[in-house]
Amino acid sequence: MRVSVIGCGYLGAVHAGAMAALGHEVVGVDVDAAKIAALSEGRAPFFEPGLPELLAQTSASGRLRFTTELSEIAGCQVHFVCVGTPQKRNEFAADLSFVDTAFEGLLAHVRPGDVVAGKSTVPVGTAERLGDLLAPSGATLVWNPEFLREGFAVQDTLHPDRLVYGLPTDDAGVATSAGSAAKALLDEVYATPLSEGVPLVVTDYATAQLVKVAANSFLATKISFINAMAELCEATGADVTALADAIGHDVRIGRKFLNAGLGFGGGCLPKDIRAFMARAGELGVDQALSFLREVDSINMRRRVRTVDLAREVCAGSIVGRRVAVLGAAFKPDSDDVRDSPALSVAAQMQLQGAHVTVTDPQAIGNAQRAWPDLTFAETALEAAAGADVVLLATEWAEYRALDPEELAQVVRTKAIVDGRNVLDPAAWRRAGWTYRALGRP
Ligand code: UDX
């Protein structure tokens, strides 16, 4: 099938490659010429494991091309809208300008019977409005949220744990005939994952839009829950990692997303819970989501607490102290620094008078653009040279595997703050280090 992908960021670039891998003929469109130039040469414009291989394989097949010209989507039967919906400046609400621009552009090129599949995360009610906008063209809007995780984006797109279609419905809540036809077309697009048994939930617009923000809110809540427990552990001398292991054995709770530490960041969880709260307020049900305000606060307190821990190990002051921050990306296997807890803590310490050197295997370029005043180093050993305290802020495999004896050779003071609870405290203490972590004695 001929499909277009509008917006080639972390979501769209991977989606375009994955659609080509599924055998479709794909054109990816983005307004960013540099991004399109890279993708056209088969290069990934950001770090995502498996994406370069996916692009190489699918570009060679001739089924995948990229352009800045929206008119080149003409002739495609299915159009995936994958543009960003960042948080508005000085507001909690989502900025829908990229989505609106994409739909206005689409209107000129879609034909009757085409399907437009909305993948961007939007406030509930947006699909209804966009569906009306599209109606005169004869194309049908399906809301088809995306659940990929950065770092696992290729795997998550090719083998999703579920697919969700939000179809247009009549007054009785039944899919319209155009909706049913659109479903059949999407079933063809996703024939491979569906044949592998990937669960499909077919529902209405409102539910499909809510599924995405509900899922992200649940994940954020789970992380903040364990981080709230970490605060209790800090007050009582308990160990949050043992607590998470113990409660995680209950299958109703589960161990995943119970890693206490610096908390969540990135381009999705923080802005999605905020946009969800803003939308609930508009709908007159803000009370239903007031707990998310607490989820957000708990998350932000972890950053403050981490700076405090660094201060404690520096005998009460970080002014003039050398701090090595290991990690700048919001999570390992990504170069994304959007709302990165690691970078936020690094910047805070710098603003409070410390001399901060940050390192990251992939995110230094993005981090440097966001915080040019910080000092950057290529490796953990370089960053830690002469350090009074080392902070592990993003749990890249190479930082988890650091040898305390080797790192001890370069630092000034053997003090480490484990912001992700991934190091073995006993091993580091045996090597003479002062080891501190969030929620652990
Ligand atoms: C998230 C959702 O997981 C994904 O389904 C959605 O499509 C987009 O948003 P992503 O932003 O890539 O994906 O990252 P995720 O793996 O969810 O991690 C988010 C943040 O939570 C990271 O900063 C991570 O370090 C943090 N985290 C995660 C924890 O602090 N503790 C955990 O136990 C898990």
Image (cartoon, rainbow, N blue to C red):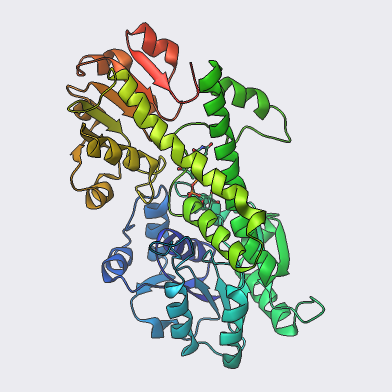
* Residue in the foreground of this view, choosing between 237 and 104: 237
- Is residue 38 shown above or below 438? below
Residue at 24%, 28% (x, y): give it: 323
Residue at 38%, 65% (x, y): give it: 59
Numbered-mark total: 0
* Residue in the foreground of this view, choosing between 126 and 18: 126
* Residue in the foreground of this view, choosing between 362 and 226: 226
- Is residue 196 shown above or below 145? above
Residue 191 at least partly seen: no
In the rendered view, does 4 fall on the left or right side of 315? right
* Residue in the foreground of this view, choosing between 231 and 194: 231
Residue at 60%, 67% (x, y): give it: 144
Q: In which quadrant will I find the N terminus?
A: bottom right
Residue 330 at least partly seen: yes
Residue at 39%, 53% (x, y): give it: 53
State the image quarter where residue 401 is shown.
top left
Q: Position of residue 182 (x, y in %)?
A: 66, 78
- Is residue 120 shown above or below 370? below
Q: Position of residue 80 (x, y in %)?
A: 52, 72
